Image (cartoon, rainbow, N blue to C red):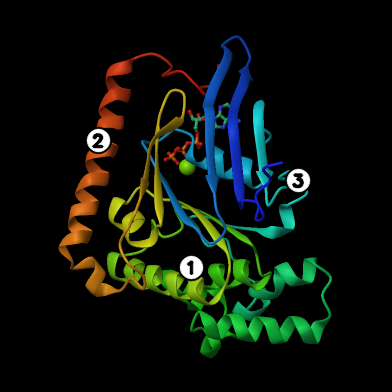
Amino acid sequence: MNTPLIVPAIALDQATKRYGIAKAGIATILESITTQVQRREFVSIIGPSGCGKSTLLKIVAGLSPITSGSIAIHGMTPQKARELISFIFQDATLLPWRTVRQNVVLGLELDGMARETRNAKVDTVLSLVGLSHVADSFPRQLSGGMKMRVSIARALATRPQILLLDEPFAALDEMTRDRINEELLRLREEQNWTALFVTHSVAEAVFLSTRILILAPNPGRIAHDLPIELPFPRTESTRRSSAFDRTVSEVSRALRSVSINSESKGDGQEIGVYPA
Ligand SMILES: Nc1ncnc2c1ncn2[C@@H]1O[C@H](COP(=O)(O)OP(=O)(O)OP(=O)(O)O)[C@@H](O)[C@H]1O
Ligand SMILES: [Mg+2]
């Protein structure tokens, strides 16, 4: 038997996602997605709007079943692997009536962990994201960047094996986004998670990733699988290097070819549009 010693974090084999839509027949959202994400990889997914990026994350999170093919998360079904996964969405989705600390502790409360253990974990993770000083503040007292850090802290508090991030930093200004990107990579050095990251920013994807998947639309499929060879640790000087510029240009070119093709294709545009 040729069983690998370490199973991949995420393994998709010919995974296909279809929706049956009343009167409109069947819409194929994702077609034959085959890829493996190894543990501790940081994989970004980019592609034109509507190509199925969020759907792919939902499939991995066990929030949406595939129609055919197979998917394994650490060798398990997505349902069984749910507790290994944390999801970070575009808006920080904090509870306004809870303090920073109370927001971060939420996931641990749901796990039924003892209060003291919980508080110690929250303190650790708040200091990791540099928010110890606002632990007792409410979300309304924080900037957008700080709210996003709380959201990251909440996701990391449960010690996930896999972090799914769906355009988490899209609403932040460029400087804040750059800084949070650097923090995310620093956290990755200290912890052992694998990341699947959706963004529309090529520069952000290049900065963060060990690999970028470019999805083509209608139906969503992997058009390019590009390893990003820039050395770690990545810092501000990475962004200023000519290797970084070159990589961003290459990825942009690949993305453009996919987008242009999708425009000229003309079919499948109705996918996912519900009849009135
Ligand atoms: N429940 C559903 N039923 C039918 N179609 C759906 C459903 N959910 C999503 N879709 C369709 O699947 C396609 C992919 O949607 P998805 O949200 O994954 O795209 P995306 O790549 O994340 O786009 P964006 O960049 O705009 O966030 C879209 O055409 C959408 O309309
Ligand atoms: Mg999306």
For the C terminus, the image quarter is top right
Q: Residues within 10 Å of mark 3 (few under 14, many from 20)?
A: some
**Label 2 to label 1, Cα distance in Å?**
30 Å
Q: Earlier in the sequence, mark 2 or mark 1?
A: 1
Mark 3 = which residue?
79
Q: Amino acid at mark 2?
A: Arg
* Mark 2 touches mark 1? (CB < 8 Å): no
The label on residue 148 is 1
**Can residue 96 be seen in this snapshot?**
no
* Helix, strand or loop under label 2: helix
The picture places residue 9, in percent across and down from the top left corner, at: 61, 53
Front label number (3 vs 1)? 3
Residue 144, placed above or below residue 76 = below
Q: Residues within 10 Å of mark 2 (few under 14, many from 20)?
A: some
The picture places residue 22, in percent across and down from the top left corner, at: 63, 14
Residue 156, placed above or below residue 262 = below
**Label 3 to label 2, Cα distance in Å?**
35 Å
**Can residue 30 be seen in this snapshot?**
yes
- Which residue is at the front of the view, 150 or 238? 238
- Which residue is at the front of the view, 15 or 179? 15
* Helix, strand or loop under label 1: helix
The label on residue 256 is 2
The picture places residue 206, in percent across and down from the top left corner, at: 32, 56
Furthest-left residue in this view: 242
- Which residue is at the front of the view, 250 or 175? 250
